[in-house]
Image (cartoon, rainbow, N blue to C red):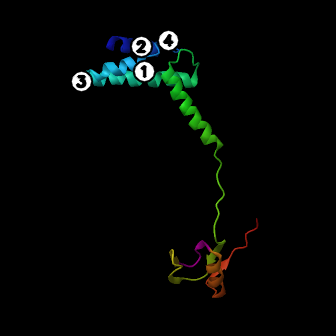
Amino acid sequence: MYEKLVKAFIMEIKEDKLLELENNFYEEVRDYVKTLQGEEKERALYFYRELRKLRLYKAFYGDRDNLVEEEVKILESIEKIHEEEKKEEPKDIYTLNNIELVRVLLNFPSFTDGKRIYNLEKNDILSIDEKIAKILEKHSIVKRFKVEP
């Protein structure tokens, strides 16, 4: 079986098109690998993995003739995932509070809104909750930007 696996790998490298394999080829290889140990097992697994990668690569970028059932299932799964990713659109960000863009007018000691600690230094630009922005603007600590939609 080892010779058959290596021969399939080498022939697959030489040819541009997919070689015709028996439908149960991978199953036979897996059964064979189970009987091996040590370095022999590692070599056989290497050729097995590389053969599969090569065949799937050819199938993605070339024709799909001579694929075995197992490879067809793998490709269908990948394409299904790819299609689902294409369909997903970014979702709008919904906030409970309006956010204001402000510029800090003077250095100000740290304070918190219960969720985060703010350290304000002169000329910092912040995006903060509208309520906090109004309070700070009322005390001439920040100036709100007028943003046109």
Q: Residues within 10 Å of mark 2 (few under 14, many from 20)?
A: some
- Which residue position is annotated with label 3? 37
Q: The residue under label 2 is which amino acid type?
A: Ala
Q: Earlier in the sequence, mark 3 or mark 4?
A: 4
- Which residue position is annotated with label 1? 51
Q: Earlier in the sequence, mark 2 or mark 1?
A: 2
Q: Residues within 10 Å of mark 3 (few under 14, many from 20)?
A: few
- Which residue position is annotated with label 4? 20
* Helix, strand or loop status at disc 1: helix
* Helix, strand or loop status at disc 2: helix
Which mark, residue 8? Answer: 2
- Depth check, mark 2 against mark 4: the one in front is 4
Foreground residue, 118 or 86?
86
Residue extent of the magenta highlight: 120-128
Foreground residue, 139 or 129?
129
Q: Earlier in the sequence, mark 1 or mark 3?
A: 3
Separation of residues labelled 2 and 1 (CA atoms) = 8 Å
- Residue occupying the far left of the picture: 38
Separation of residues labelled 1 and 3 (CA atoms) = 20 Å
State how many labels appear.
Answer: 4
Q: Residues within 10 Å of mark 1 (few under 14, many from 20)?
A: many
